[in-house]
Image (spheres, rainbow, N blue to C red):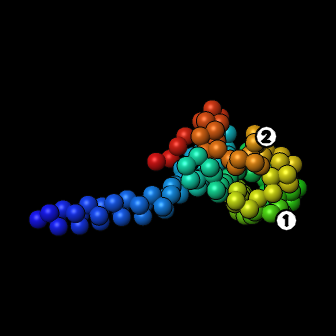
Amino acid sequence: MNFYKKSLMLIAVMAFLVLAACGAQEQTKTFTKNANGLESELKYWYKDDKVTKQTTKNKITYATMGVTNKEEAEAILKPASEQYQGLQGVKESIKYEDDYAIEDVEINYENVDFDELKNVPGMLFDENAKKNGVSMEKSEELLKKNGYEEKK
């Protein structure tokens, strides 16, 4: 009986050590906002408080933009889209439909060049992001302050 207790205890200790060695598991959080003709969904991948990746999906109607067709929408959105192209760790594309456009942005924070990214309008980082990474807690706080809700 004593042998079985010791064996079980050894297995439990080994399992704990294996789990501890694996470190924090990557988690995700998703936030949404729908206001004034713009639907936005941001998804974050993070470990502990450090964001590793972010995707953003924005859907905007042409009426919201004050245009009536794809060509007019592209004339407005293309200059902003071009600022993302060629940035290390960033993928961005816009798909134009009959009466709305969908923008997809993916940022790999483990590979992104923060010095390049900070020059893109709308990209907000605190001064320590390059050194310490992007904080999930601060990101969530900022999003909620700006009307985003967590999607559970």
Q: Is residue 114 left or right of residue 47?
A: right
- Residue type (three-letter) at the residue carrying disc 1: Gly
Q: Which is closer to the viewer, label 2 or label 1?
A: 2
Which secondary structure, mark 1?
loop
- The residue identified by callout 1 is 86
Q: Closest to the observer: 118 or 55?
A: 118
Q: Position of residue 35 (x, y in %)?
A: 64, 40
- The residue identified by callout 2 is 127
Farthest-out residue, left: 1
What residue lies at 58% left-to-right and 53% top-to-bottom? 46
Which quarter of the picture shows residue 91?
A: bottom right
Query: Tags 2 and 1 in contact by the CB under 8 Å rule?
Result: no
What residue lies at 85% left-to-right and 65% top-to-bottom? 86
What residue lies at 65% left-to-right and 57% top-to-bottom? 53
Which quarter of the picture shows residue 72?
A: bottom right
Q: Who comes first in sequence, dot 2 or dot 1?
A: 1
Q: Position of residue 147 (x, y in %)?
A: 61, 35
Q: Position of residue 40 (x, y in %)?
A: 64, 48
Farthest-out residue, front: 2
- Residue type (three-letter) at the residue carrying disc 2: Glu
Q: Position of residue 131 (x, y in %)?
A: 75, 48
Q: Is residue 81 in view from this perspective? A: no
Q: Is residue 11 in view from this perspective? A: yes
Give the spatial CA distance, label 2 vs label 1: 23 Å
What residue lies at 55% left-to-right and 40% top-to-bottom? 149
Q: How many marks?
A: 2
Crowdedness near tag 2: few (<14), some (14–19) or many (≥20) residues, C-alpha within 10 Å: few
